[in-house]
Every structure is written in structure tokens, then in C-alpha cells.
Image (cartoon, rainbow, N blue to C red):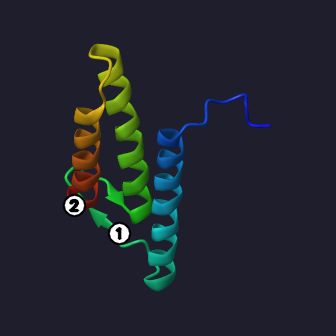
Amino acid sequence: MLSWMAWTWPTAFVFIGIFSAMAIITVLEIKRPGGAERTGILGLTTTRGDRLFISLLGTAYIFLAWLGFFGTPLWIPLGLAIAWGGFCFWKV
């Protein structure tokens, strides 16, 4: 039924992670409405959702660039992506 896409455990973990982050953001928004707006290092006024989007977009670029330049293994870009996500929620 789902044979049109190569569903593997790493693929499942990526989607589980994205949906878990969205669920956490939703719970935080219900608990503290307003999105915790702030102006960060980029000069943009962002909310939690904006920072999640920027971190996910940057993560995709990190992995694509790594695959384009170096190939596998992907442990180093995973560390870079986690650091990028932390940076986005801390400073952006």
C-alpha cells in the first residue's frame, strides 16, 4: 500500500520528530498564547512557530549541502542541524 515511497526507520524518525516538535509548539501556544515574540540577531520579529520553521528549513539546507559536497555518513550534519536548531531558538 505504501510501496511508492521507501519508508525506513530513519524516515519515520524524521517525520516523528517534526510532528513531535509541532505538537510541543501547539501545547506551548495553548499554555502561553502569543507565540513569545522577540527580535533576534537577524533583526526579525519571530514567534516560536517562525523559529521552528527557520530551524527546519536550515536543517534541510544543511543536509542537502552535506550530501552534495561530501555524501554519507550523515552524523556530522546531524550535529550541525541540532546546533542550528538550538541557535535558532536561542538567538533568532
Say if mark 1 contacts mark 2, CB within 8 Å. no
Indicate the quadrant where residue 80 lies.
top left
* Foreground residue among 92 and 86: 86
Residue at 72% across / 28% down in the picture? 4
Outermost top residue: 69
Percent across and percent down for residue 12 are 54, 46
Give above or below for 32 relative to 9: below
Q: Which mark is residue 54?
A: none
Please name the residue that numbered disc 1 is placed on: 37
**Residue type indicated by callout 1:** Glu
Residue at the extreme right: 1
Q: Amino acid at mark 2?
A: Trp
Q: What SS does tag 2 mark? A: helix
In the picture provided, is 79 more to the left or to the right than 11?
left
Which residue is drawn at the image coordinates 22% and 34% (left, top)? 76
**Above or below, 31 relative to 91:** below
Placement of the N terminus among the 4 image quadrants: top right
Label 1: which secondary element: loop
Residue beneath disc 2: 90
Q: At which x and y percent is residue 67? A: 35, 20
* Residue at x-position 66% and y-position 30%: 5
